[in-house]
């Protein structure tokens, strides 16, 4: 899977790619763009994945307007199908039960020309992710851990799906592997505040490169 990473902020885990505007960054970005052009992308739908607090819904709505597409929030679809809040579903059937419901409902989404913002736990659903791969391009909104810490605060208040005793770092470590596994395109956000305009511009730039 080819990932395109867009960022101007240094990241110790990707030292060469994210070194400030010099030859290493420019060269690696050129290679990424070349590889992008050799990959076939499904332009029917764009599916956003990422941690809670990564801006999937916020960016998704703006992308839908910019690209003249419908916007779908998969969490709202789940609530409509179950007739209850996500928190109530989790309380009623437990975390594993919720993941099964999420996987089933997401795998049945029948939409076209849409931007789909998924819940942070959607990547745990193998059927849903296989379906998303078949109906569109998957874009991962990657946020550094330190930025997520500032944005999320209390996990329960934010409604983040997690088991008792799990920390944000535990969740981040487990999910990041899955986000990276499924992503066709990755847009990495800076350590600093949530700059919607910058993230939107980076995302649209990546999408335009592959023909969206």
Image: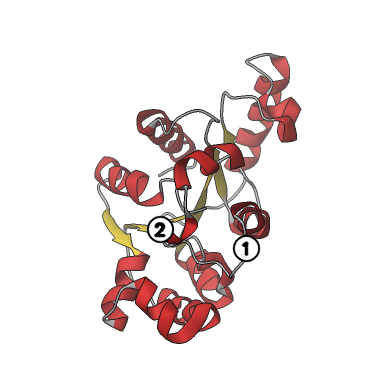
SS class of the residue under badge 1? loop
| Residue bearing mark 2 | 157
The answer to whether residue 148 is above or below residue 74 is: above
The residue depicted at 34 percent of the width and 74 percent of the height is 78
Residue 9 at x, y = what percent?
A: 59, 24
SS state under label 2: helix
**Observer-nearest residue: 46 or 122?**
122
How many residues crowd mark 2 within 10 Å: few (<14), some (14–19), many (20+)? few
User: Which of the colour schemes (rainbow, by chain, secondary structure, one colour) is used?
Assistant: secondary structure
Q: Position of residue 96 (x, y in %)?
A: 55, 80
User: Badge 1 local density, few (<14 within 10 Å), some, or many (20+)?
Assistant: few
Name the residue: 24% across, 44% down. Answer: 65
Residue lying farthest to the top in this orientation: 22
Query: Which of the pair 24/50 is nearer the observer?
Result: 50
Which mark, by number, is residue 25? Answer: none
As drawn, 73 above or below 209: below
Measuring 67% from the left and 60% from the top, which residue is drawn there? Answer: 174
Residue 191 shows in this picture: yes
Q: Where is residue 177 in the image (x, y as percent from the top left)?
A: 68, 56
Question: Quadrant where the C terminus lies?
Answer: top left
Marks 1 and 2 in Cβ contact (< 8 Å): no
Distance, label 1 to label 2, CA atoms, is 15 Å
Instruction: Read off the residue under disc 1.
Output: 166
Quarter location, residue 118: bottom left
User: Is 139 situated left or right of 108 in this image?
Assistant: right
The vertical placement of 169 against 164, above or below, is above
Q: As displayed, is residue 121 above or below residue 110? A: above
Q: Quadrant of residue 193?
A: top left
């Amino acid at each position: 899977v080819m990932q395109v990473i867009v960022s101007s902020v240094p990241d110790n885990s990707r030292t060469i790619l994210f070194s400030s505007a010099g030859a290493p960054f420019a060269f690696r970005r050129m290679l990424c763009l070349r590889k992008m052009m050799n990959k076939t992308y499904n332009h029917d739908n764009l599916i956003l994945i990422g941690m809670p607090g990564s801006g999937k819904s916020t960016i998704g709505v703006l992308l839908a307007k910019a690209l003249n597409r419908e916007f779908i929030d998969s969490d709202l679809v789940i609530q409509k199908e179950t007739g209850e809040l996500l928190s109530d579903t989790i309380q009623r059937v437990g975390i594993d039960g919720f993941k099964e419901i999420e996987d089933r409902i997401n795998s049945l989404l029948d939409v076209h020309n849409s931007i789909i913002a998924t819940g942070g736990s959607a990547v745990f659903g193998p059927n849903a992710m296989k379906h998303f791969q078949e109906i569109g391009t998957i874009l991962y909104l990657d946020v550094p851990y330190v930025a997520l810490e500032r944005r999320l605060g209390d996990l329960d208040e934010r409604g983040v799906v997690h088991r008792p005793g799990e920390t944000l770092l535990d969740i981040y470590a487990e999910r990041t592997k899955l986000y990276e596994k499924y992503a066709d395109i990755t847009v990495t956000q800076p350590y600093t505040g949530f700059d919607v305009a910058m993230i939107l511009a980076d995302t649209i730039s990546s999408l335009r490169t592959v023909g969206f």
